[in-house]
Image (cartoon, rainbow, N blue to C red):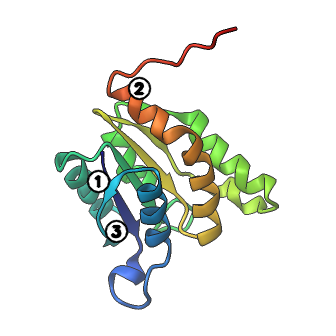
Amino acid sequence: MKAAVVVASNRASSGVYEDTTGPLIVDALRSWDFEVGPPAVVPDGEPVADAIREALADGAVAVITTGGTGINPTDRTPEATRPLLDRELPGVAEAMRARGVANGIATASLSRGLVGVAGSAIVANLPGSRGGVKDGLAVLAEVLPHAVDQLQGGDHVRSES
């Protein structure tokens, strides 16, 4: 299964500093048996949409973004993502924010990240902080493989009780 990581950062994309969140996501995806290359590091806004489109066209069944989900005027990842989604999965996005708040980070509630279905892929927006990425990945670890399986026609495992 192919996956892709998109880092939305004006500063990292211009070489001001090196992104450290994309590699966390790549490592997590690989541990969940996804095939994933290095993160695409792009400026905020429309370049994020372009990178997501490219990943989907390349056959990714999961695309995870990091960055651009806050309330800074340049944070535009949700606006770039929403038009690409066929259906939103608000419960997953809410669970990621709730995980951060439960971990004592009240500002996690300011994240505007989306999670949804684009064709036969899951697209998830994580915050740009390492802590926010770790919280988001903790939630995705529990749901992403199942969600991808469902999109590919998998069935729910039936319990014996």
Give the Cα distance between marks 2 and 1. 21 Å
Q: Which residue is mark 3?
A: 39
State which quadrant residue 45 falls in.
Answer: bottom left
Mark 1 vs mark 3: in front: 3
Q: Amino acid at mark 1?
A: Ile
Q: Secondary structure at mark 1?
A: helix
Which residue occupies the foreground of this view, 91 or 10? 91
Q: Residue at x 32, y 27 (%)?
A: 152
Q: Quadrant of the C terminus?
A: top right
Q: Position of residue 40 (x, y in %)?
A: 30, 68
Q: Is residue 125 left or right of residue 3?
A: right
The residue sitting at 64% across, 10% down in the picture is 160
Res. 133 visible in picture: yes
Q: Quadrant of the N terminus?
A: top left
- For the residues bearing labels 2 and 1, Cβ distance under 8 angstroms: no
Which residue lies under the disc numbered 2? 150
Is residue 136 rendered to the left or right of residue 4?
A: right
Secondary-structure class at tag 2? helix
Disc on the earlier residue, 2 or 1: 1
Which residue in the structure is indicated by mark 1? 52
Residue 55 spot, x, y in % from top left: 24, 53
